[in-house]
Amino acid sequence: MIELLFLLLPVAAAYGYVMGKNNASNEAQQHNQEIINEYSKGLKFLLDREEDQGLEHLISLLEISANSVEHYLTLATLFRRRGELDRAIKVHELLLKHDALSLEQKKHVLYELAQDYMMAGLLDRAEDNLVYLYSLEDKNALCQLMMLYLQSHDWDKGIELFQAKESDFYNSQLKKTVANFYCEKALLENKFNQLDAITELTQDLVRPKFILGENAFKQKDYLQAIKYWGSLLDKNSAFSPIFLDKLEICYEKLNLQKNYFSHLSKHLKSDNVLIKIHYCKSLMKQGKHDEAINYIKQVLRKQPNIRGFSFLLTLMSEQSQDIKLVLTEVNKLVQDYIATKALYQCNHCGFTSKKLYWFCPSCKHVESIVPLNGVDGF
Ligand SMILES: [Zn+2]
C-alpha cells in the first residue's frame, strides 16, 4: 500500500503550489488549506499502516475537490486491480459529480467506471455507460460493449450493433467476435443458414466454417463437409486436429481416398505433425508400410513429437509380431503421458487447457486458443 503514498504526494504538492500563488484569494487559500490538512491526515493514516481509514479519508476528499483527476483515476485503477471494486466505483462515481471535468475526462471516467461495473457483475449499469460512449463514436466503448455482450451471452444485441454500421467500421478482432456471436446463436437455435454469409468476414476466421462442416457431417452431406473443412485445412491448418479425423471419414464415405491423400500432400510442410501422421495412415492404406515408417522416422528426426512417436510404435508393432507386446506396453505409457498434457493454448495470454474454448476464459480473446504444436502437441 505504500505505493499509494507516492501516488498521492504530488496531489498534496499541487495544492501547496496553488496555495503559494500570490493571486489566490483569502477564501481560496483557506479552502486549499483545509484540503491540505485533510490530505495530511489521509497520508498519516497510510504511514501508520491504517490503510482502510487512510483510503476512505482520501476518497472522501473527492467530495470537496476534483482537482488532480489523473491521480484519482490511477488510484481507482489500482483499487480495481486489487479487486477492491467498491472503492474503484466510489472514486469514479464521485469524480463524475464534478462539473469541472472536461468532456474527454468525463468520457475517460465513464469508460473506467463501466469496467468496474463489468467486473462487479453490474452489467446493466456498464451497458448504459458504454452505449452512451459509443453514441459519441468511441471505438474503445464498442470493444468493451462486445465484451459485455459476450459476458452476458447477449448474442442478438452484439449482432444488432454490428449490423447497424458498415462492416469496415470494425477491426478484424471485432469481426471475429461478432462472427462467434453468430455461431453461438446458430448453435442455440439450431439454424445455420446465416453462417455461410460470415465465413469470410475476416481472414483466419475458423469457427463458422468448422460449425458448418460439423452440421454437414451430421446431415451426412460429406461433400459439403469437405468443402468447409477442406477450406479450413488450406487456410488454418493449425486447427486441423479438431476436424481431420472426420474429414478423412468424409473422403472415405465418398470413396475419394486418393483426393484426401493429395490434399494432405499439399500440407506436408506445415508444423502440424498430425497432418503427417494422417498422410502416413494414407500410405499404409495403400500398402506402403515401409514408406510410411521411413517417412515418420524422418519427420521425427527433424520435428520430435510425442504423438508421432506413439504412431511410429504402432506402425512398428504391426510389422513385427515378436516385439508387438513390448511395443504395445511402451505405447500405452506414451499414451498415458499424452493424456496428462494440455492440448490447447491461448496465443494471447498463454492459458492452456485440454478443451477448445472459442472465447479464452482467461483473457476473453476470441479464437485465440489454438491446438498446441511442439513436442507434446499435435
Ligand atoms: Zn487468453
Image (tube, rainbow, N blue to C red):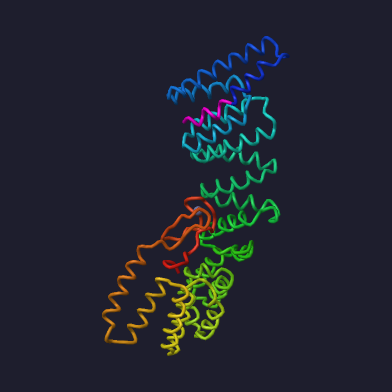
The furthest residue to the top: 26
Q: Is residue 88 above or below residue 19?
A: below
- Decide which of 224, 190 is in the foreground and name it: 224
50 or 332, nearer to the observer:
50
Judge by depth and name the residue closer to the eye, 166 or 18. Answer: 18
Q: Which residue is drawn at 59% across and 64% down?
A: 204
**Horizontal and vertical percent position of residue 33:** 60, 14
Report the span colored magenta.
1-9
The reply, left or right, for residue 328 in relation to residue 193 is left
Q: Looking at the rendering, which quadrant does residue 101 occupy?
A: top right
Q: Position of residue 91 (x, y in %)?
A: 55, 29
Determine whether, in the image, residue 128 is placed left or right of residue 48.
right
Q: Residue furthest right?
A: 23
Residue drawn at x 61%, y 21% is: 65
| Magenta stretch holds residue 221 | no
Considering the image in quadrants, where does the C terminus appear?
bottom left
**Which quadrant of the figure has residue 332?**
bottom left
Q: In this view, does 332 lie above or below 185?
A: below
Q: Where is residue 88 in the image (x, y as percent from the top left)?
A: 52, 32
Identify the residue at the far bottom of this view.
287
Q: Where is residue 50 in the image (x, y as percent from the top left)?
A: 43, 23
Q: Majority secondary structure of the magenta segment?
A: helix
Tally of marks: 0
16 over 226 or under it: above or below: above
